[in-house]
Amino acid sequence: MVQNIKPQYRQIWQTVQAIPAGKVASYGQIADLAGLPKRARLVGKALGCVPKNGWQGQAVPWYRVINSQGKISLPQGSDGSLLQKQLLQDEQVVVIGCRVKLKDYQWQPSIDELLFKLQF
């Protein structure tokens, strides 16, 4: 099954794996960093297809990806939304309602992270 995974999904998952605990990134930011500009919706689709055992032996922290307004994109009050909020709070990310202050928590990768962690 793993052989049938789209190469773009692999790029997205690898990029999401690079987001450090306690930080978030937007769908568009992940698309850009994965070399897929203007493909934010593809990021959402890829995150919905993450294998149960993660990717390359590591979990894919899907919950660290939110929309460009700093909001959890899952329907408010849904099980998925509540889980995402809890997982972010477990990493000390402040979530008020379903919103995160991007100014405080958005991942800003260094050039080293880009060169050494994101190898496509």
Image (spheres, grey):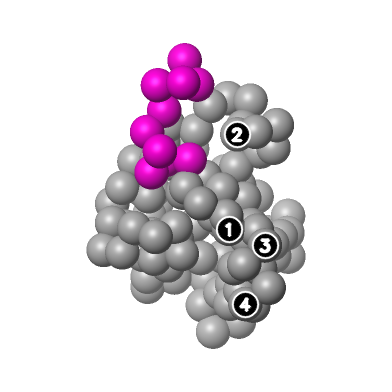
Q: Look at the numbered disc 4 and give the secondary structure of its residue.
A: helix
* Residue bearing mark 2: 55
Front one among 53 and 5: 5
Considering the whole magenta stretch, tell me its main secondary structure.
helix
Q: Which residue is drawn at 47% across and 15% down?
A: 1
Instruction: Name the one closer to the observer, 31 or 120.
Output: 120
- Give the total number of marks visible in the rendering: 4
Q: Which of 1 and 20 is in front in this view?
A: 1
Query: Is residue 117 shown in magenta?
Result: no
> Are the two marked residues, 3 and 1, in contact with CB atoms closer than 8 angstroms?
yes
Mark 1 lies on residue: 118
The mark nearer the N terminus, 4 or 2, is: 2
Which one is nearer the viewer's eye here, 69 or 106? 106
Say if 41 sits above or below 96 in the image: above
Q: Residues within 10 Å of mark 4 (few under 14, many from 20)?
A: few
Q: What residue type is labelled 3?
A: Phe
